[in-house]
Image: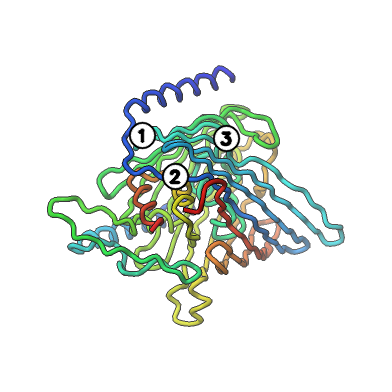
Amino acid sequence: MRTKLIGIALALTFGFVVIAMAQSQNGNNQAGSPSTSASPATPVVCGDGATLSTPKPAAPKPGVKKGLTADQMYKANCTRCHAELPTMDARRTATVVRHMRVRANLTEREAQAIFEYLKR
Amino acid sequence: MNRSIVLVLGIMLLVTAGAHGQAPVYTKPESATPILTGFVGTAADFQPDQQQIRPTISPIVLIPLGQRWLIESEAEFEGNYTHQTGQPWDHEWDKGVEYAQINFIANKYMTLVGGRFLTPFGIFNERLHPGWIRNLPDAPIITDLEMTDSNGGMVRGAIPIGTTLNVNYAAFFSASTNNSWVGASRAAGGRVGFFFPKARLEIGTSFQRKLQDDHVNTYGVDFIWQSTKLPLDIRGEIARNRFTGSGYWIEGAYRMRRAPFWRPFMRKSQAELRFEQFFTPTDMPTIPIGGMGDMPDVNTQRFFAGWSYWVRPDIRANVSYGRQFNTEGDHNIWTVGITYRFAFPLAGGSK
C-alpha cells in the first residue's frame, strides 16, 4: 500500500516535470519571444490594486543566449512562494533581497535583477 | 563535540579567507538598511470536543553589513490556548529562536552561514513555514519528521548552468545543544535542488543523518511547480525516516484573479487544496527520545481545502476545512486565521 502510494506521488511528480519541460520548450520555440509567460504584457497585480508594470524588453542580439527578463525572474523566483508581496522602498527591498538570496538560493544575477525590478 | 565545532569553524574561516581573495567586484552597491520584519497572527482550530486558539508573534531582524554580510534572527512566540469539552481552558506558550545566523556572501556561488539556522531539508521548513507565507494554517504532518533548527555551520549557494538550469545546494553540520530556546541535535546533511526558471519548476532532494541517539537517516524529495499559463502553484514533499515514519503531501493553490465574477473580491483571493498521508514506521525499535512529537501513532490521511483573502498585500485572512482519516476515528478540522506581515526600517530614511 505504502509503496503504491509513494509510486503514485512519484508518478505525479514526473508528470509535472514532463508538462513543465514541454511548456518550457514551447516557450523557447516562440521565436523572439522574450517572455515565457502566456501573457507577457500582463502587469504584476498587487493586492491593493496597484500594479508593477512589465518593462518592454529589448530585442535580443543575434548570437547572444536568451535569458529571462527581470519580470520573469521575479515571477519564477518570488511568486512561487509569495502569493502577495507588499511593496517597500529601495533600501528595505535591498535588505530583503539579500535575505532571500541566501534563503532561496538565488543566483547573483537573479538577486540583482529582482532588486532592480522591485525598486522601480 | 567541541573539537568538531572548532574544526568546522576553522574550515569556514579558511574558505572565507580564500573566497575573499577572489571576491567579485560589485559595481552596484546596495543601499541596504537594517529592518524589523516578521508577522503577527492568530489561528483558531475547531475539532470535535476540542478548540484551540494559536496566537503567534514572530519578529525578524535583518542587519546588512557592507555589501556581503547579513545578520538575521527570528524569534517565535506561539501560544496554545486549548479547550476540551467539560474542562476549563488551558494554555502554554512555546518560545524559541528560529534562527540567529550570520551570512557571508563569499562569491557568486557560495554563501557561508554560521550560528543557528533553519535546517535545509525539503522546502517547507526553510521557505514555506512562516504563517504569512504558507497556504494553509496547519503544517503537513511530515514536517515533524524533519529537524527544524540546527546550530553550527552551513555552506550554500546557487550555480547557473546556461540559462535553463540553476543548481542550488546547502550542506550543514549541527552540534547538539540542550536548551529550550535554541535546542538542536548533532546532525549533518543537506539539500540539492534543480531549478528550471523557464519552466518554473524546482525539484530537490534532501538528506540528513542524526549523529546521536539512534543515528537514523532521513531522506526527502520535494518539488515546486508554477504554471506559466494559469495562476496555479503546485508543490509537494516526500520524507522517509525508518524509525519515525514516512509520508508525503501535495498542495495546489489557484489565484482567482481571472474569475469573471465578484472581481473586487476574487482578485484578492486564492483557493487551496492539500492532500497528505503519513505512515507509521514498520521497524521502530524504541520510541524516539522526546516521543513522537505531534505525529500520529497510526497511519493517517488528511485533506484540506482553504481560501485566503488579502485585505491588503500584508494582511491575509484565511479559512480552511480539513478531514482526517485514521483508525482512531475520522474527524473534521475547521481553521480560521489572520496574519499581518510587517517590515519597518530600523535605521536611515525611507529612501
Tags 1 and 2 both on a single chain: no
Chain under numbered label 1: B
**Residue at image coords 48%, 79%:** B263
Q: Residues within 10 Å of mark 2 (few under 14, many from 20)?
A: many
Looking at the image, do the residues carrying marks 3 and 2 touch, with CB atoms under 8 Å apart?
no
Give the quarter of the image for residue B333: bottom right
Q: Is residue B142 left or right of residue B106?
A: right
Observer-nearest residue: B272 or A83? A83
Badge number at residue B116: 3
Residue under label 1, please give it: B107
Q: Residue at x 32, y 28 (%)?
A: B22
State the residue position of label 2: A98
Q: Which kind of residue does numbered mark 3 sit on?
A: Arg
Three-letter code for the amino acid on which mark 2 is drawn: Arg
Looking at the image, is B108 positioned above or below residue A39?
above
Of all residues shown, which one is farthest toward the front? B349
Q: Is residue A117 above or below residue B119?
A: below
Q: Quadrant of the N terminus of chain B?
A: top right
